Amino acid sequence: MISGDLSANGGVTRAGRQVAICGAGGHARVVADVLSSQTPAVDIAGFLDDRPELHGTEILGRPVLGSPGSWMAKNSAEKADLIVGIGNNRDRERIAADIARTDFRLATAIHRSAQIGSDVSIGPGSVVMPNAVLNAGAVLGAHVIVNTSASVDHDCVIEDFCHISPGVNLAGGVTVGRGTHIGIGASVVPGVRIGEWATVGAGATVTKDVAPNTTVVGTRAVPVRLRRAAQ
């Protein structure tokens, strides 16, 4: 079931448009499957990747068209929309910045099995994987990944470039700061704020706010190191 507010991007993807996927790794293949699951299925133009050895090959029956930069320089924004199919948050941010300097629009990929509340807001370039749940009032920024079977409860705010891994459970009113990665199977109790570019380890239980650029692990999750903010 797909519903919710997709007005930031004009819909899951524009009718009759092709979508080119930036990236050609495992995450990009999953994004392709998500796009193909939509009704009607999205026409995938191909994959874009910086690795020359992949150029001219095929992935899931679709061509690797070249590097993102060179392809965008040679093609019109009327040809296709783009989506970044890269799991690493920093790399996704970097490529998104390159796209933002062009006229290309972003697609949003939502698997047909995802359950989306009627007043959920999903930003452009975001990906919602199979069996994910986004409950009432949840807000996703741009280029967010909500991975397989993750649960985002009511009134959560997930800022740009976050990755919510498979099986994560966010209770109501959680805020996840920009660029944060929450590891597989982690749980976050109601009302917690996780600062930007933090990392929550796999299986952790977060019961208190997490400072920016901090990694927390365990049950209860406790800080193990403070990471210097990116310059």
Image (spheres, rainbow, N blue to C red):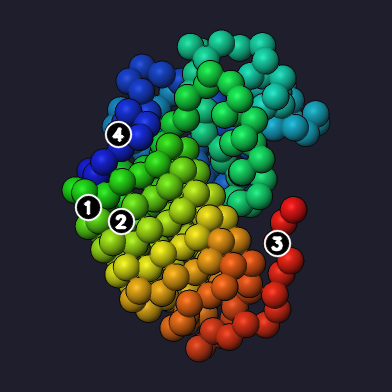
Residue 222 locus on image (x, y percent): 58, 85
Name which residue lies at 64% across and 30% down.
Answer: 98
Residue 187 — which label? none
Q: Is residue 25 visible?
A: no
**Marks 4/3: CA–CA distance:** 33 Å
Residue 117 — which label? 1
Dot 1 or dot 3, earlier in sequence = 1
Residue 91 locus on image (x, y percent): 67, 45
Q: Nearer the viewer, residue 56 or 48?
A: 48
Q: Secondary structure at mark 3?
A: loop
Residue 229 — which label? 3
The outermost residue toward the front is 231
Q: Which residue is mark 2?
A: 138
Residue 7 — which label? 4
Figure check: 127 above or below 200: above
* Residue 5 picture quarter: top left
Residue type for callout 1? Gly
The outermost residue toward the bottom is 220
Tell me: 66 left or right of 81: right
Task: Judge depth for marks 2 and 3 and give the one in front.
Answer: 3
Residue type for callout 4? Ser
**Marks 1/2: CA–CA distance:** 8 Å
Q: Are marks 1 and 2 in contact (CB under 8 Å)?
A: yes
Q: Secondary structure at mark 4?
A: loop
Figure check: 87 above or below 202: above
Q: Nearer the viewer, residue 115 or 154?
A: 154
Residue type for callout 2? Ala
Residue 184 locus on image (x, y percent): 52, 68
**Marks 4/1: CA–CA distance:** 14 Å
Classed neighbour count for the residue bearing mark 2: other residues with Cα under 10 Å, few (<14), some (14–19), many (≥20): many
Name which residue lies at 49% across and 69% down.
Answer: 194
